[in-house]
């Protein structure tokens, strides 16, 4: 296991992707720890020192190169990852030493950039008033997914009943809060009594269902007696199937994630209730936030207003140390996080 970063590092530590997990193998076994010399710059480039890493459920499909919005994950390359970092060297006119930036920098100490990141996306500068943690969570992909997806696809209406699966996770806990602000009655699905109490007592969800203790379809019917008008699904599988069995007329279903099947695509359960989508005249749409980059700036501004006004809580689970990156995926898939899961470098 690598040691924490020394004060003046001359090496570039990486967690390189090795292979997709074999049956029974933890996700943390899919990576090799490698050290190399710190990269050198050419004209027009700058060097980003990573500080904070965003841990995503979608990293598993990235490993399999199943996400067309992300470059293929190559064996022997750093694991793809959104991260926040600081410009520590620059031969680029528009990026200055000391600026903080976000992008796909991968699981490594240093990333060379020329204005775009590993994924060929434009590198975003971070407002000096924004914390490192918020820069990779509520004001980045998690928050943007929740805000843009809810309003563009979910189209909440005052009085709607909104059902959120994965409700205590990085996106779900924000979707629920945004839906409450839009005038919805909000019901969350989570995996422990503690998380269900947190959703109701802290985030003010109207109800919460523990899928590990309750049979989902009757529990949803009980919590949503008039049916589900807006179903935001982060989980897929049996949870998605149970939710669509309880749709109200003209419901909207936002398919945002498939956490329940990411770790084993060979075990996708059948959709027994799929006819309910037609019967309820529902609109069922897949959503990937990177299709809506033109809306990022407006969504960030709105989220910052809500944060500053204390109307939205951004929950985070933070692990410290570069060595924690592989274990963070195991942590995520075991459901040991509340809100956004983040790994921070130790200075």
Image (cartoon, rainbow, N blue to C red):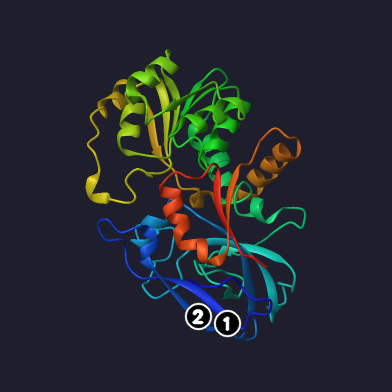
Left/right of residue 279 with respect to residue 302 in the rendered view = left
Image location of residue 146, percent across then percent down: 54, 40
Image location of residue 34, percent across then percent down: 46, 78
Q: How many marks?
A: 2
- Comparing 89 with 210, the one in front is 210
Mark linked to residue 11: 1
Q: For mark 2, what is the residue? A: 35
Could you tell me which secondary element the residue under label 1 belongs to? strand
Above or below for 222 versus 311:
above
- Comparing 96 with 30, the one in front is 30
Could you tell me which secondary element the residue under label 2 belongs to? strand
Residue furthest top in the image: 225
The residue depicted at 35 percent of the width and 33 percent of the height is: 239
The residue depicted at 37 percent of the width and 58 percent of the height is: 27
The residue depicted at 57 percent of the width and 73 percent of the height is: 109
- Comparing 118 with 320, the one in front is 320
Q: Is residue 243 visible?
A: yes
Image location of residue 345, percent across then percent down: 61, 64
Q: Residues within 10 Å of mark 1 (few under 14, many from 20)?
A: some
Image location of residue 119, percent across then percent down: 49, 66
Q: Earlier along the polypeptide chain: callout 2 or callout 1?
A: 1
Left/right of residue 311 with respect to residue 1 in the rendered view = right
Q: Is residue 247 visible?
A: no
Picture quarter with the C terminus: bottom right
Tell me whether the residue at label 2 lies in contact with that at label 1, contact meaning CB atoms closer than 8 angstroms: yes
Left/right of residue 216 with respect to residue 194 in the rendered view = left
**From mark 2 to mark 1, how far is it between C-alphas?**
6 Å
Mark linked to residue 137: none
């Amino acid at each position: 296991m690598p040691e924490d970063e020394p004060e003046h590092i001359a090496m570039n530590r990486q967690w390189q992707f090795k292979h997709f997990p074999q049956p029974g193998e933890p996700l943390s076994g899919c990576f090799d720890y490698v050290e190399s010399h710190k990269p050198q710059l050419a004209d027009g480039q700058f060097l980003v020192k990573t500080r904070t890493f965003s841990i995503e459920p979608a990293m598993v499909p990235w490993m399999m190169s199943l996400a067309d919005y992300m470059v293929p994950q190559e064996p022997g390359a750093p694991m793809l990852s959104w991260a926040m970092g600081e410009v520590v060297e620059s031969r680029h006119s528009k990026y200055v030493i000391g600026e903080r930036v976000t992008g796909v920098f991968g699981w490594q100490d240093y990333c060379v950039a020329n204005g775009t990141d590993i994924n060929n996306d434009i590198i975003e500068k971070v407002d000096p008033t924004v914390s490192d943690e918020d820069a990779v969570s509520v004001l980045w992909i998690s928050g943007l997914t929740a805000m843009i997806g809810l309003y563009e696809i979910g189209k909440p209406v005052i009085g709607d009943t909104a059902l959120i699966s994965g409700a205590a996770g990085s996106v779900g806990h924000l979707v629920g809060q945004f839906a409450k602000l839009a005038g919805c009655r909000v019901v969350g699905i989570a995996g422990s009594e503690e998380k269900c109490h947190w959703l109701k007592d802290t985030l003010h969800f109207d109800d919460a269902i523990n899928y590990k203790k309750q049979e989902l379809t009757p529990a949803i019917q009980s919590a949503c007696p008039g049916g589900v008008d807006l179903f935001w699904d982060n989980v897929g599988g049996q949870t998605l199937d149970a939710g669509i069995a309880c749709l109200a007329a003209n419901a909207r279903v936002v398919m945002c994630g498939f956490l329940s099947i990411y770790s084993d695509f060979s075990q996708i359960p059948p959709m027994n209730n799929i006819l309910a989508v037609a019967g309820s005249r529902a609109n069922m749409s897949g959503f990937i936030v990177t299709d809506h980059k033109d809306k990022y700036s407006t969504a960030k501004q709105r989220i910052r207003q809500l944060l500053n006004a204390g109307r939205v809580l951004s929950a985070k689970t933070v692990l410290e140390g570069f060595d924690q990156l592989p274990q963070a995926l195991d942590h995520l898939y075991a459901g040991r996080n509340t809100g956004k899961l983040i790994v921070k470098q130790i200075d």
